[in-house]
Each structure stands twice: as structure tokens, then as C-alpha cells.
């Protein structure tokens, strides 16, 4: 069978897109590499809660249970996405890890590691923004007796029996883990460039909700406002500032630049000897599986951005959804994935009409 559209990835963007396409009577198959829908969320730290309230964390046609102004945890989001697929009767195949894609005679052949091949007239990459944790090459020089983890492998403090912890990367995830571990461990946080923090709420209203109402959150990625927000890279949580982390006992070092034996050394000459290193330098895209020419480069998957063309690629029937800044700041939020999915659904519909 040749499907009208195959979607790679059953995250919020892929599921939402599949729902829109199904309503257009387009045959859709979703291939998901994990054992369950939502597993990518279940792997997050146990203490994680979203920065956005439940009212912004749901897809069309299905309300997320609970206080709409409250903040869901990782299990709520994972279970919600799983139920969303069931509620909309979406065709999802699990444990399907795609390893190559071929494009011949306007048909995509998608091969999975279990030996199956699926064909589609249109293909959508919905693997999401958080695929591979960035790890510096310097990690190769860290002695084998020092355990190394990536942020997606960390669950809770009980997991780490050794006391001296070094966290590399001071984004929201790294800072939250540093704050949590400081209660029971000796924590050193290697930081990068300074970044601004905003309160999670202003006057009792979530900051991102306010930005949404002010049309800041939805500003086109290419606009002056969009480029300014991207450059600032603010964190909507002011309970993990330097001052608060220091008060908790976290040692804040500058950027990690070298390793000398068991010592990790910053560019300011500060050093520590951790038992465990946790890498939290953000994520990069896994482009190995999309093997057709001109679909990716050193920066990741190739596609257009912005409200009008966000998600289009060099191929007339290959699209992307779920990518950060695909159209605006909201693209990486569950709320923002809806508009992106609707736009890409229209692209798919038009591509099928032109075949």
C-alpha cells in the first residue's frame, strides 16, 4: 500500500498534523521509534513541569484534564498525547525506527530497522527538536571512571549515588537539575553566555500567555521582533537564577574548556573533580535517517521558516513540522505546534493535488 502521507514521529506536532490530514480524507501513517507514544516525555527528569499552563498544552478537540491555569508534569503530557492518538483513531505504528529514505518517481520509500518498507506520496519529518543531546568533543578526554550522562538519561537524585556532580550547560534543564541535586549532592554548574530570566507569572498570569496575547509569541521568525526574541533566548522561569542557585550551594563556573586528568577546567581557570558529569548543552537534530540528497546540512534539516512557508523543503512533497522557530517562538510549544501542523497539512493537501 502507498499512503498519501507518512509522518515520522508521534509527538504533539506529528499527531496534530495526522488529525488534520485525516479530516481531509488523506490516508496517513505515523511511524514512531519508541515503545509508547509520549515516551520522549517520560524520559524527562521526574521533577519536570512545563513552563506553560494546561490551557496551552493541549491539541484541538481534546482538553487536558486538570486546572487549566496549572502546570502539567511529564506524565500528564505523555499520557495526554497517547490518549489523543487513541481519541482520534490515528494510525500509529510503534517501535519503528527509520534508518533510510529513498525518493524515486515521486514516491518515498521509508525503511525501518525491523526490515519493513513503507511507501508514501508525501513525507513529513515530525521527529521534533529534542533528538540528540549536544556533547562536546572534550568528553573523550574525561577518564572512564567518571560517569557521563546526558540530561535525557537523568531522572532523579536517587539515581546518582556519587556525591560530586558537574553539570555542563546552564539552560533551563541544566539549571533545574542543578537546583534539585543541590539538596543532596555537591553540584558544579558550568555556564555559557549570560541569558535573561523572566518570571513564570506576572500579576498571576503566565508570562507566555501574556506574550501570546501581545502577539509576541507568534511573531514571525524572520520579523524584527522574532529575531530579537531568538537572540535574547530568555528563560521563562526566575526561580533558577544565579543568585538562587548559589544560595542552594551550587558552584557556578564559566564555560568548560579543558580536562586535566580528573579535573574539569573552565575558561576562567576554575576546576573541579566530579564523580559524575551530566551534559545539558541543548539538543541537535538527528539527520542520519533522512538519506535523500539536499535534505540536511551541518545545521540540521533544511526547510523554510516563517508564517507563510515554514515547513517547506527543497522537495515539493517533503515537509517538516515540530522544529524550533519553524514559524515563530511558539513553534517549540505544544500550543504553537497546532498552527504549524495546520499550515503543513495544507501544504500536503496541495502537493497531493499537484501529483
Image (spheres, rainbow, N blue to C red):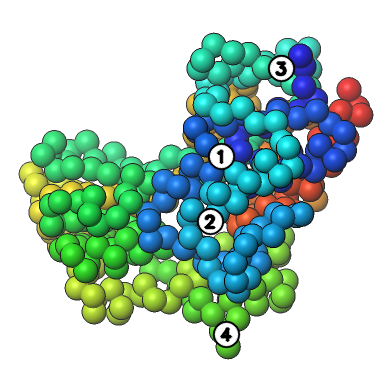
Q: Earlier in the sequence, mark 3 or mark 4?
A: 3
Looking at the image, the residue that sits furthest to the bottom is 203
Could you tell me if residue 168 is visible in this image? no
**In the image, residue 227 lies at what x, y percent?**
62, 62
Residue 76's tag is: 2
**Label 4 to label 2: alpha-carbon separation:** 23 Å
The x, y position of residue 106, in whole percent, is: 79, 17
The residue depicted at 55 percent of the width and 24 percent of the height is 96
Mark 3 closeness class: few <14, some 14–19, many ≥20 residues within 10 Å: many
Sequence order check: which comes first, mark 2 or mark 3? Answer: 2
The secondary element bearing badge 1 is classed as loop
53 or 124: nearer the eye? 53
Disc on the earlier residue, 4 or 2? 2
Task: Find the distance from the CA under tag 2 to the CA under tag 1.
Answer: 12 Å
- Position of 233 compared to 187: left or right? right
- Residue identified by numbered label 4: 204
Toward which corner of the image does residue 19 lie, by quadrant?
Answer: top right
- The residue carrying mark 1 is 37
Name the one closer to the observer, 43 or 254: 43
Q: Are the residues flagged by discs 3 and 4 in contact, CB closer than 8 Å?
A: no
Earlier in the chain: of badge 1 and badge 3, it is 1
Amino acid at each position: 500500500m502507498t499512503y498519501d502521507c507518512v509522518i515520522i514521529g508521534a509527538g504533539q506536532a506529528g499527531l496534530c498534523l495526522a488529525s488534520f490530514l485525516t479530516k481531509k480524507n488523506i490516508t496517513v501513517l505515523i511511524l514512531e521509534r519508541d515503545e509508547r507514544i509520549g515516551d520522549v516525555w517520560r524520559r524527562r527528569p521526574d521533577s519536570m513541569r512545563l513552563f506553560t499552563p494546561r490551557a496551552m498544552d493541549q491539541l484541538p478537540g481534546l482538553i487536558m484534564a486538570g486546572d487549566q491555569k496549572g502546570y502539567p508534569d511529564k506524565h500528564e503530557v505523555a499520557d495526554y498525547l497517547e490518549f489523543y492518538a487513541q481519541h482520534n483513531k490515528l494510525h500509529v505504528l510503534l517501535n519503528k525506527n527509520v534508518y533510510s529514505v529513498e525518493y524515486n518517481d515521486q514516491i518515498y520509500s521509508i525503511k525501518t530497522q525491523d526490515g519493513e518498507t513503507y511507501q508514501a506520496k508525501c513525507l513529513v519529518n515530525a521527529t521534533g527538536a529534542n533528538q540528540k543531546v549536544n556533547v562536546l568533543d572534550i568528553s573523550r578526554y574525561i577518564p572512564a571512571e567518571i560517569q557521563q550522562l546526558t540530561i535525557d538519561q537523568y531522572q532523579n537524585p536517587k539515581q546518582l549515588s556519587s556525591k560530586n556532580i558537574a553539570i555542563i550547560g546552564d539552560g533551563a534543564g541544566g539549571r533545574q537539575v542543578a537546583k534539585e541535586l543541590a539538596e543532596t549532592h555537591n553540584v558544579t554548574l558550568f555556564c555559557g553566555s549570560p541569558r535573561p530570566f523572566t518570571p513564570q507569572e506576572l500579576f498571576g498570569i503566565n508570562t507566555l500567555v501574556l506574550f501570546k496575547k501581545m502577539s509576541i509569541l507568534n511573531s514571525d521568525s524572520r520579523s524584527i521582533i522574532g529575531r530579537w526574541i531568538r537572540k535574547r533566548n530568555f528563560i521563562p522561569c526566575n526561580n533558577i537564577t544565579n543568585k538562587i542557585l548559589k544560595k542552594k550551594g551550587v558552584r557556578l563556573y564559566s564555560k568548560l574548556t579543558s580536562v586535566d586528568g580528573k579535573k574539569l577546567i573552565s575558561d576562567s581557570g576554575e576546576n573541579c573533580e566530579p564523580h559524575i558529569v551530566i551534559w545539558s548543552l541543548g539538543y541537535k537534530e538527528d539527520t542520519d535517517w533522512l538519506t535523500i540528497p539536499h535534505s540536511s546540512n551541518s545545521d540540521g534539516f533544511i526547510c523554510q521558516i516563517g508564517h507563510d512557508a515554514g515547513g517547506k523543503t527543497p522537495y515539493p512533497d517533503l515537509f517538516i513540522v515540530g522544529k524550533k522557530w519553524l514559524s515563530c517562538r511558539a513553534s517549540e510549544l505544544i500550543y504553537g505546534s497546532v498552527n504549524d501542523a495546520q499550515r503543513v497539512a495544507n501544504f500536503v493537501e496541495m502537493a497531493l493535488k499537484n501529483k
